[in-house]
Amino acid sequence: MKVKTILVSQPEPKIENSPYFDLQEKQKVKIDFRPFIHVEGVPAKEIRQQKVDLHNYTAIILTSRNAVDHFFRVAEEMRFKVPDSMKYFCQSEAVAYYLQKYVVYRKRKIYVGKRTFSELTPLIKKYKDEKFLLPTTDKLKPEVPQILDGLGIDWKEAVFYKTVISDLSDLADVLYDVLVFFSPSGIESLFHNFPDFKQNNTRIAVFGNTTIKAVEEKGLRVDISAPTPETPSMTMALEKYIEKANKGR
């Protein structure tokens, strides 16, 4: 079965040199982008109901760009002026870089992990006397609270934004050769929108073990997966599969 059309369950990349655009051109396939899930902010009123007073915290743990956006949104809604002395613990360089949208980077106390949450813990441990706030999503990975509890620090988790299923009803009669998923929430959205979804000849590409598990639990077949040592990115995994499937097209 050849591959001509691909649907990626994420927003279209904003950068011109995205590997998806290169893949589209090189392999002569059509790639569409559509977020199967989206993020909605929790109003300040609901955050107050979680017994959160921003004045009580001296350090913020930021795990994603969404966490950055929604922390500063809530601070504004609560008319809380974030003090210059606030410490920011960012899970990765990408999150720390994004923080510059809101603060003057060189004038702030910013501590950066490598990539995973556990790699951030030595830095948090070093400042264990701070009062930490973790602004997060309703879909927080269970290991994050476990890790923070294990550090014996004063911390609080608060839901600042939620992952919401997108309405995909306009795609009901549209068929793609490959569907690409990056999270279990994407699979949940697929079945919420199309409860009778049958895979048939549709190939499913997934990123990460938790997404593979979600696909298999729904009785679906995983045809393309990443990351692997050979194909560390989704575009590389797609390219390898397309080259094989479209041989002699």
Image: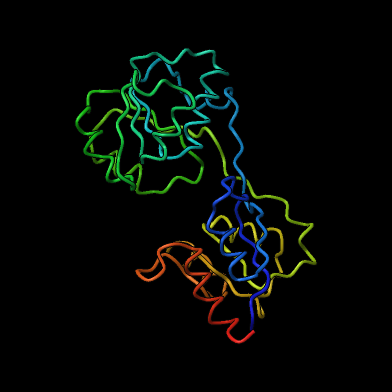
- Residue furthest out toward the left: 126
Q: Quadrant of the N terminus?
A: bottom right
In the picture shown, does residue 136 fall above or below 60? below
Q: Quick check: 89 left or right of 152?
A: right
Q: How many marks?
A: 0
Asked which colour scheme the image uses, the reply is rainbow
Q: Is residue 21 above or below residue 121?
A: below
Residue at (65, 61) in percent of width and height? 190
Residue 111 in the image, given as x and y percentages of width and height? 29, 31
Point out residue 214 in the picture as x, y percentages from the top left corner.
51, 65
- Is 122 situated left or right of 131 in this image? left
Q: Quadrant of residue 180?
A: bottom right
Q: Which of these two is toward me, 222 or 185? A: 222
Out of 154 and 187, give the one closest to the viewer: 187
Q: Quadrant of the C terminus?
A: bottom right
x and y percentages locating residue 224 in the rendered image = 51, 73
- Residue drawn at 59 percent across, 33 percent down: 41
Q: In this orientation, which residue lies closer to the viewer: 232 or 155?
A: 232
Tell me the quarter of the picture where residue 215 sits. bottom right
Q: Where in the figure is residue 52, as x and y percent of width and height?
A: 46, 23
- Residue at 35% of width from left, 27% of height from top? 88
Tell me the residue at 65%/62% (across/down).
Answer: 31
